[in-house]
Amino acid sequence: MVMKILDGLDGFLYYPVLIIVLLAAGLYFSLRTKFVQLRLFPESIRVVMEKPNKEGNVSSFQALMVSTASRVGTGNIVGVSTAVCLGGYGAVFWMWLIAIIGGASAFIESTLAQIYKRRSDNGEFYGGPSYYIESALHNRGLAVLFAVSLILTYAGGFNMLASYNLQSTFAVYSFYDPAVTPWIIGAVLAVLVGWCIMGGGKRVVKATSTLVPIMGLGYVVVSLIVLIAHANLIPSVFAQIFKDAFDFQSIFAGIAGSCMMYGIKRGLYSNEAGVGSAPNAAAAADVSHPVKQGLVQMLSVFIDTLLLCSATALMCLCSGVLPTEELAGAPYVQKSVETVLGSFGPIFVTVAMVLFAFTTLLGNLFYVENGLAFIHKSVPSKQFMTGFRILCAAVILIGAGLPMAAAWDIADILMAVMCLINLPACFRLGKVAIDACRDYEAQRKAGKNPVFRAADIGMDPDQLEWWK
């Protein structure tokens, strides 16, 4: 009964509601910014290595790593595999499309987070959708609702799913007992994450900055090895991807289970463009112009989907192992890597999943604490945060024992709620970010290092806490 309710709600939220909102927002922002995600892509690479204005503050790169830690996670392995096994080859194309279009949405939301960011007493910056909804739309109720949905999504749905996905990679080993092993793995993961988050946001930034580049690079290298070993299959795989993607007769015959729907769902879960999560990290960066961080967070979407998700999809589809419903999830990836690396393949995927899941959990809880601070109008008491972090660790334990369908449905539903609050707010405030983009480009053309002042784009500086 519960699964029927979850499946029904999940299906309604994504089709027709969210698919229309996502594509409309992405296309609208792409057109209004003249496809900023393509025009200024080289610029995004240039600014990502800039140092913060004040030594000790969060840099663009560190903010990128926090948001990428959340984006680059179990969805890049298990999510992509599930989409391909259940939706078919064409799901890969729809993941690519939602990333390219979504890059513009990611740029807008993160630029807005920078413009409306606030500064704490110790000099650190913070912000996100809740803050720009409250400051610019003057709607504290909606802002609190977004913060609550963010907390439920990341401390609940996404962390339970990450925990489930991690333990599922151990299913191929002989010692795995479905009744016991998930709980043991969940307990170990809960303890490790609990220890880390007790150190607060600074430890999160440091850990993710170190682990994300290492795990991402290693995973791409192994994917390339598998691709090279099966290079003869690459042309036929690409042909099948595009053939299935445009088989509209099959898509509209059963859209809920089509390659389009699985590609959009898993692509959105992986890159989170428009969800409203990354702006919480973007606001923390100390930059001279808000557009710089908008460009950096846009780059994170491409790193996630066009690089890492594509690495998984092409590695699997070119391995010669046919995608089936029975292999959906980690087993398909492990079988694919095994074709080249032998018995080491499943072990490598398990190690990758441990790193991906761990950094996902840390990045998620960074966002959650930002949401709590907004609701409380200050950082909650130490006693409250300790209790809350223990609860978060317990949720990770519970997630390891969930059925696969329930884990995905809960995560999808909660993510959809965030999107349906954040994207309409971005529609209302989009002009501010677009004007900031024009100001940035004008300064770059004049040979300057862009510096933002609210009055330069017609904003009232008194409405902001920074950029006066």
Image (cartoon, rainbow, N blue to C red):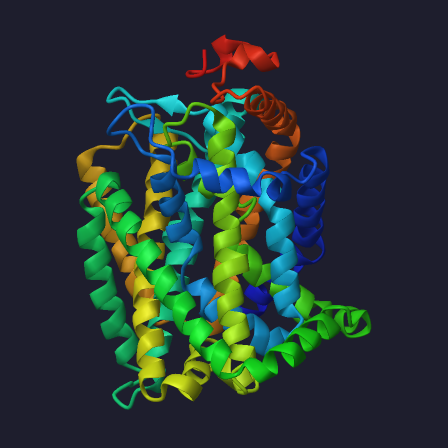
Q: Residue furthest right?
A: 249
* Residue closest to the eye, 174 or 69: 69
Picture layout, residue 427 above or below residue 303: above
The answer to whether residue 305 shows anywhere in this view is yes
Left or right? Give the position of 243 relative to 343. Answer: right
Residue 214: percent from the left, percent from the top?
Answer: 31, 59
- Residue at coordinates 79% horizontally, 68% vertically from top-left? 252
Residue 400: percent from the left, percent from the top?
Answer: 33, 69
Residue 350: percent from the left, percent from the top?
Answer: 32, 74
Residue 75: percent from the left, percent from the top?
Answer: 46, 63
The answer to whether residue 143 shows anywhere in this view is no
In the rendered view of the protein, which quadrant contains the C terminus?
top left
- Residue at coordinates 73% horizontally, 38% vertically from top-left? 31
In the rendered view of the protein, which quadrant contains the N terminus?
bottom right
Picture layout, residue 279 above or below residue 287: below
Picture layout, residue 278 above or below residue 327: above
